Image (tube, rainbow, N blue to C red):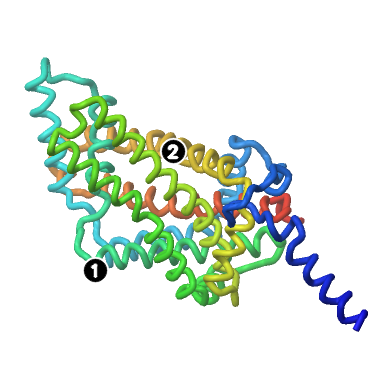
Amino acid sequence: MARKTSKLRLVWNKIWSRRWRFSAHKTFRRSYREDYKRDLEVPGMMAHIFKTFKVIFKNWKMFLPLLILSVVMGVVFVGLMSESTYQQFQTVLDQTTAEMGSGDIGVMGKAGLLLISTVTTGGLSGSSNEAATVFAVLIFLMIWLVTIFLLRHIMAGKKVKFRDALYNSMSPLVSSLVVFVVAVLQCIPIFIFIVALSAAVQTEFLATPFYALVFFIFSALLLLLSGYLLSSSLMAFVAVSAPGLYPGKALRTAAELMQGRRIRFILRLVALILALAVMWVVVMLPVIMFDLFMKQFEWTSQIPFVPICLLIVTCFTGIYITAYLYIYYRWMLGYDGKEEK
């Protein structure tokens, strides 16, 4: 009897120990700083950005076929922005600048405005129907899974062929779709914010300072909620690419991995957005300026040069985002992120 009592006491002490009672962010009980403070020694943001570029360009023979395949699939299944639509942007921009003043804003200024208007109005594709959206999601998932498969073998020092990556990386497709659906559900607060902002602008609700303050607090809470949830879902999106890992376990593992590290991860995402913005400006501005020069000749007026370059840069952006997040995921697991010789 004494032996049974001692076993029950050990189980009881394990359940009600401090480690079990104070699981960070999972109960309404008080948690202590040492329970959720988790140090993470990783390279800086700039090193992270250049590390990702280095890995991609060093192994360009692996990623170039993926880029070509994704561009071809984007043209076939999603479509390009039509050249007439792009020319409409130019016409509207010329008319607007002419009405505002002298009508001469410079070639670089015009190219920058064309780039902003093309990206912000969703002009990356020629079709906006439901089928094109589904195909776009599937192409992104293909880029995501193939890139992670290639990086997993490259960073392990193993030789891999693009054909093997294309055929073998699709096994976690259903699991990735489940995590993707969970991430979309976690974006519901953002959708609510967008609807509320549209209604507030139309009804002039924000004209009153007090109501504007209330709306600002309400919006901040919604955005914080989605940011908190999505930070772990992005890591789950990386984790679920491992063969044999179920979506539920991937979500739980990522949530535990991100405890106490969400703010640093969000800062990494901000650095990623800034790096991509600089990349788009550096690559696309010369392309648009060259297109403006070539459009002076009649025989080049119908060549969709800018739409094709936009699609190429978009597909490369998907590869870069995947590599960026996967490298950080390896660092969080304790890997140094260096390829083995």
Residue extending farthest to the bottom is 1
Q: Is residue 274 visible?
A: yes
The residue at the point 73 percent across, 53 percent down is: 334
Mark 1 or mark 2: whose residue is earlier in sequence: 1
Q: Quadrant of the N terminus?
A: bottom right
Q: Secondary structure at mark 1?
A: helix
Residue closer to the observer: 215 or 237: 215
Give the Cα distance between marks 1 and 2: 30 Å
Q: Position of residue 84 (x, y in %)?
A: 13, 48
Q: In which image quadrant can residue 116 be found?
A: top left
Residue 55 in the image: above or below residue 75: above
Q: Quadrant of the C terminus?
A: bottom right
Q: Position of residue 73 (x, y in %)?
A: 34, 65
Residue closer to the observer: 206 or 248: 206
Residue closer to the observer: 71 or 136: 136
How would you rate the neighbour count of disc 2 (Cα within 10 Å): few for under 14, some for 14-19, many for 20 or more?
Answer: some
The residue at the point 24 percent across, 45 percent down is: 196
The answer to whether 123 appears left or right of 278 in the picture is: left
Q: Which residue is mark 2?
A: 279
How would you rate the neighbour count of disc 1 (Cα within 10 Å): few for under 14, some for 14-19, many for 20 or more?
Answer: few
Mark linked to residue 305: none
Residue extending farthest to the right is 2
- Of discs 1 and 2, which sits in the foreground? 1
Q: Secondary structure at mark 2?
A: helix
Q: Position of residue 170 (x, y in %)?
A: 49, 74
Mark linked to residue 131: 1
Q: In which image quadrant can residue 59 be found?
A: bottom right
Task: Report the amino acid beneath label 1.
Answer: Ala
Residue extending farthest to the front is 1
The answer to whether 41 appears left or right of 235 in the picture is: right
Q: Is residue 40 visible?
A: no
